[in-house]
Amino acid sequence: MDAVSARPVSRITVLSGGMGGARFLQGLLHGIAAGTLPGVAADAEVTVVANTADDIWVHGLKVCPDLDTVMYTLGDGIDLDRGWGRRDESWSVKEELAAYGVEPTWFGLGDRDVATHLVRTQMLEAGYPLSAVTEALCRRWEPRVRLLPMSDDRVETHVVVADEAEPSGRRVVHFQEYWVRMRAEVPAESVLVVGLDASTPGPGVLEAITETDLVVLPPSNPVVSVGTILGVPGVRDALRASPAPVVGLSPIVGGTHVRGMARQVLTAIGVEVSASAVGLHYGARRSGSAGVLDGWLVDERDADQVERVRAAGLPCAAVPLMMTDPAATAAMAAAAIALVTGAGAAEAG
């Protein structure tokens, strides 16, 4: 870490999910442009390794929710009220499909959004890998980051829920069905990530982790977003071997998630729903452990948990972690950078 703090941070890699990761990236880019991030060069480059285990095939189209949310958000095309999909969207295609009685009716593709999925699907069917397709789509949106899928391989998250109608008493549903149709209102018994063990990191992913000055785990879901990225064979080892410091920000504030279903999936994997427990779940990156972090930020409302994290050998501080606007989010990024690089000081709780 001393070597990093001695020179400007010019390369930053972020392991991102969808909405939470995209909003954090907005703040990070705002901080770089405003010069408010300690020790970060004014021309610092940001690479995003995005979760693709939320991907789903719908009506014959390949949909990549997290990739698209990052791309649309940073390309100024996101629907700000929903936090996903295109701004000024219309729904004629969805309505016509419903009129034909075509399922799934619970997963809606907007008319503008369909164009993205059509282009992606056509390119995939022509033999282009997802990484090349994503690069091509980003030429239109110019998201100001290098956006990399975690893997070109098909990986899909499924959730096991109780179902009395099934002989086993359980049913496995795609993550999108659990989140969109069921609204995560049914307890998740377990989380299955199909294809993860056989997947390989996408082009540029390992280099983005090992050839950078800083790695950030934003306040994305620690199980079905960041957790799946870390589950791609080779990614965790690259993160542990990287010479760059690795810092994370808690998605749990005041004992629950701010948005999403982190509470449900943390419970499913047996992790306490608290800011400190998530930090300890990622673990400290030190000799003899399997952890990946050099620092962990919790919200000021969880300041009483700082010592628990520090006692496990993981530097920790408490600062405001609500992403109310880009400036507030940039302040979060600044505190995270300061914690692991020594370029400034994060206020400890």
Image: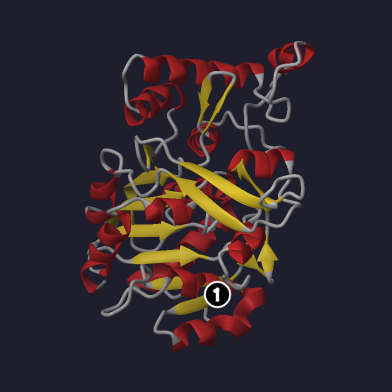
Residue 313 at least partly seen = yes
Type of the residue with mark 1 = Ala
Q: Residue at x 66, y 21 (%)?
A: 110
Query: Which residue is nearer to you in this view: 98 or 51?
Result: 98
Q: Are there few (<14), some (14-19), or many (20+) residues within 10 Å of tag 1?
A: some
Query: Which residue is nearer to you in this view: 142 or 225?
Result: 225
Q: Is residue 172 left or right of residue 240?
A: right
Find numbered disc 1 in the image and state the secondary structure of the residue it sits on. helix
Residue carrying label 1? 277
Q: Quadrant of the N terminus?
A: bottom left
Q: Is residue 181 left or right of residue 343?
A: right
Q: Is residue 89 above or below residue 326?
A: above
Q: Position of residue 160 (x, y in %)?
A: 62, 51
Residue 321 at least partly seen = no
Q: Residue at x 57, y 70 (%)?
A: 271
Q: Residue at x 67, y 44 (%)?
A: 179
Residue found at the very far front of the displayed protein: 167
Q: Quarter of the image holding residue 133?
A: top left
Q: Is residue 61 left or right of residue 315?
A: right
Query: Which residue is nearer to you in this view: 320 or 191?
Result: 191
